[in-house]
Image (cartoon, rainbow, N blue to C red):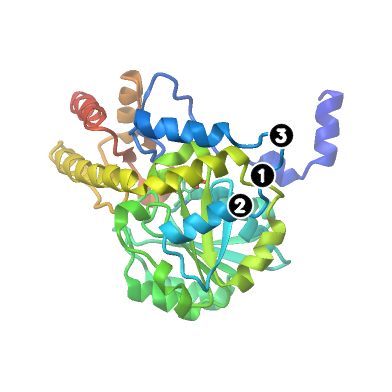
C-alpha cells in the first residue's frame, strides 16, 4: 500500500470504504430508458421563459436559504395543506439522507419494504442506522402482517413506503398504509416520486396523521436535471429536519427555473397522460412476447420478467438501448428488467430490439 492509501485507511470509516457508490452507467449516445426520466424536451417557448428567469438570477449572491417564493408556488400548485410544514431538497435523495441522519441514535432502526428504492437502505448504512427490510410477496403485494410484526419487534424510527413502488410499479392499498401509520412508533414517509403517473396521493391526508410525511420530486415530472425534491409533514417534524439541511441546498438556478416552470404544470400533466397511454401500449406489447411476464404499473416504468434477463440486457446495450437490469438486486426480482416508458419511437426501438433478442 502507498502512503496515501494507508493514510486514507487510517482516517476513513471502514464501512464507508466498503460501500459501493450509487451506480450510474454511462449513457452518452444511448436510448436512455433506465432512470425514469421524462423523455420529452421542453418546447422552445418554455425554454425561452426559463432562460429569462435564470438569466435574471443574482448569481453573485447566495440563494434565498428558505426558497420562500418557490415554496409558496409549490404549496399552491401541489395543493400542500396550509397546516403542513415543507422542506426542500437537492433532489428527494437529499431529504431521505437528512431524515435518516435525524433519527440516527444508537440502537435506532428504519424499515423499508423490499424490493424498493435503494437509497432508503443506503442512507441508513451511511448514517449507521440499522435497516430492517420486510419483503413484499412474490406478486409484489404488501405483506401487512409481516410489516406490522416487524414494526412491533423493531420499533423503527422511520417506515419508508414508495407509492407507487420503484421498481415494481404498484400502489399499495390505502387501508394497509393506514394500518402502518396506526402501528408505527415514529415517522411514516410515503414517497410519491411517481405521483403524476399514479393519480393517488396521501398529501390531503397529512392533516389526519401527525406521523405522516409525504415526499415528492420534480425529477419524474420532467425536470430531473434541476434536482428539486420536497416533503410535507407537521411543522414540528420539519422544524427539526431543517436543522440538518445544508445551507442554501437549493441553488439559485434551480429556484429560478422551478419558480417559472411551476407556472406551466399543465404541460407536464399532458406529457404524463401521454406517458401513461404509452405505458399501456408498451405493457400490452411486452406481454405478447414469448416467455415475458409484465407486472402492472402505476408509474412511468414497466417491470418485466424475461427468459435470461442479463443476456437480453446485453443484447439491448449492443443496440444502444439502456434499461435497468434488476436480476441479482433482490431475490424477488430474478430475471427482471425495468423499462422506463420513452417516446413512442423509443418504445418501438425497444420492442424491436426485444423481439430480436428473444
Ligand atoms: N424516490 C423514489 C421512489 C425514486 O425512485 C427516486 C429516484 N429514482 C427518488 C426518490 C429520488 O429522486 P430525486 O432525488 O431525483 O428527487
What percent of the width, then of the height, locates residue 327?
38, 40
Q: Nearer the viewer, residue 185 or 47?
A: 47
Marks 1 and 3 close (CB-CB < 8 Å): no
- Res. 338 image quadrant: top left
**Who comes first in sequence, dot 3 or dot 2?**
3
Q: Residue at x 33, y 39 (%)?
A: 340
Pointer 2 and pointer 1: residues touching (CB < 8 Å)? yes
Alpha-carbon span between mark 2 and mark 1: 7 Å
Q: Which residue is mark 3?
A: 60
Q: Is mark 1 within 8 Å of ligand 1?
A: no
Residue at image mark 1: 63
User: For the residue carrying disc 1, how many other residues have a C-alpha within 10 Å: few (<14), some (14-19), or many (20+)?
Assistant: many
Q: CA distance from mark 3 to mark 2?
A: 16 Å
Q: Residue 231 in the image: x percent, y percent?
A: 52, 60
Ligand 1 under 8 Å from disc 3 Cβ: no
Horizontal arrangement in the rendering, residue 308 relative to residue 107 (left or right)? left
Query: Which labelled disc corresponds to residue 67?
Result: 2
Q: 44 or 213: which is nearer to us?
A: 44
Q: Where does the N terminus fall, quadrant-wise? A: top right
Q: Position of residue 141 (x, y in %)?
A: 32, 63
Q: Is residue 135 above or below residue 36?
A: below
Residue 225 sits above or below residue 356 on the image: below
Kindly state the secondary structure of the residue where label 1 is placed: loop
137 or 122, nearer to the observer: 122
Judging from the image, what secondary structure is the residue with disc 3 in? loop
Quadrant, the C terminus: top left
Position of 81 with respect to 240 (left or right) is: left
Amino acid at each position: 500500500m502507498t502512503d496515501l492509501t494507508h493514510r486514507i485507511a487510517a482516517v476513513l470509516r471502514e464501512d464507508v470504504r466498503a460501500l459501493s457508490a450509487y451506480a450510474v452507467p454511462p449513457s452518452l449516445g444511448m436510448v436512455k430508458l433506465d432512470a425514469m426520466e421524462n423523455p420529452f424536451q421542453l418546447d422552445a417557448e418554455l425554454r425561452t421563459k426559463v432562460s429569462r428567469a435564470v438569466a435574471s438570477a443574482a448569481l453573485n449572491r447566495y440563494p434565498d436559504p428558505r426558497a420562500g417564493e418557490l415554496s409558496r408556488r409549490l404549496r399552491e400548485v401541489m395543493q400542500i395543506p396550509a397546516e403542513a410544514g415543507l422542506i426542500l431538497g437537492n433532489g428527494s435523495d437529499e431529504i431521505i439522507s437528512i431524515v435518516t441522519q435525524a433519527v440516527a441514535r444508537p440502537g435506532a432502526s428504519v424499515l423499508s419494504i423490499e424490493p424498493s428504492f435503494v437509497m432508503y437502505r443506503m442512507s441508513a448504512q451511511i448514517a449507521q442506522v440499522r435497516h430492517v427490510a420486510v419483503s413484499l410477496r412474490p406478486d409484489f403485494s404488501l405483506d401487512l402482517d409481516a410489516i406490522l410484526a416487524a414494526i412491533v419487534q423493531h420499533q423503527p424510527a422511520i417506515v419508508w413506503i414508495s407509492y407507487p413502488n420503484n421498481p415494481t410499479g404498484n400502489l399499495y392499498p390505502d387501508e394497509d398504509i393506514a394500518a402502518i401509520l396506526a402501528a408505527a412508533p415514529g415517522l411514516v414517509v410515503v414517497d410519491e416520486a411517481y405521483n403524476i403517473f399514479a393519480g393517488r396521493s396521501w398529501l390531503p391526508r397529512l392533516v389526519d396523521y401527525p406521523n405522516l410525511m409525504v415526499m415528492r420530486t420534480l425529477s419524474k415530472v420532467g425536470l430531473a436535471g434541476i434536482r428539486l425534491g420536497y416533503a410535507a409533514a407537521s411543522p414540528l417534524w420539519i422544524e427539526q429536519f431543517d436543522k440538518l439541511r445544508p445551507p442554501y441546498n437549493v441553488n439559485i438556478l434551480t429556484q429560478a427555473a422551478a419558480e417559472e416552470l411551476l407556472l406551466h404544470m399543465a404541460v407536464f400533466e399532458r406529457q404524463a397522460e401521454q406517458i401513461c397511454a404509452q405505458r399501456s401500449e408498451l405493457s400490452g406489447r411486452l406481454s405478447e412476447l414469448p416467455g415475458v411476464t409484465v407486472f402492472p404499473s402505476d408509474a412511468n416504468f414497466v417491470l418485466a420478467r424475461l427468459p435470461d434477463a442479463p443476456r437480453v440486457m446485453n443484447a439491448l446495450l449492443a443496440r444502444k438501448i439502456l434499461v435497468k437490469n434488476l436480476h441479482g438486486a433482490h431475490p424477488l426480482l430474478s430475471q427482471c428488467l425495468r423499462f422506463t416508458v420513452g417516446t413512442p419511437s423509443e418504445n418501438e426501438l425497444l420492442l424491436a430490439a426485444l423481439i430480436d433478442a428473444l
